[in-house]
Image: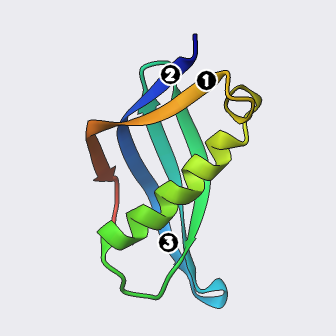
Amino acid sequence: MVNAMLIKKIQYDNLRFVKDKGSYAAVVILTTNVCTMCLQAKAPGEAGMIRSEIAVGLMRDALRQVHQLPEYRTGREKITVADYVTQEFRQTA
């Protein structure tokens, strides 16, 4: 039987645009049915992008990092995002 981690809430904190790298960075906080994870994520972008576009890139990077953890890399556990997931920016860029 494969265990599943269900992501129920996503928060973005300390969002900033890194001009010399042409990217956004933030702490992505994933609240799941198992635990809460805090990941430093980055996403390519341009200054002034809308938050929903920034969030897609940051979430993509956060999920990439989670998939590298041994329990998920081996397929012993599965990661899913709830249909009702809430997203929140904890401060402005």
Question: Can you tell which of label 2 and label 3 is closer to the viewer?
Answer: 2
In the displayed structure, does residue 26 sit left or right of residue 87? right
Q: Which residue is mark 1?
A: 77
Q: Residue at x 42, y 32 (%)?
A: 31
Q: Secondary structure at mark 2?
A: strand
Question: Can you tell which of label 3 and label 1 is closer to the viewer?
Answer: 1
Q: Which residue is mark 2?
A: 4
Q: Amino acid at mark 3?
A: Arg
Relative image position of residue 41 (x, y in whole percent): 59, 58
Q: Are marks 1 and 2 in contact (CB under 8 Å)?
A: yes
Viewer-nearest residue: 85 or 48: 85
Q: CA distance from mark 2 to mark 3?
A: 32 Å
Q: Amino acid at mark 1?
A: Glu
> Can you say which quadrant of the picture contains the C terminus?
bottom left
First-in-chain label (3 vs 1): 3
Q: Amino acid at mark 2?
A: Ala
In the displayed structure, does residue 72 sit left or right of residue 47? right
First-in-chain label (2 vs 3): 2
Q: Residue at x 57, y 16 (%)?
A: 2
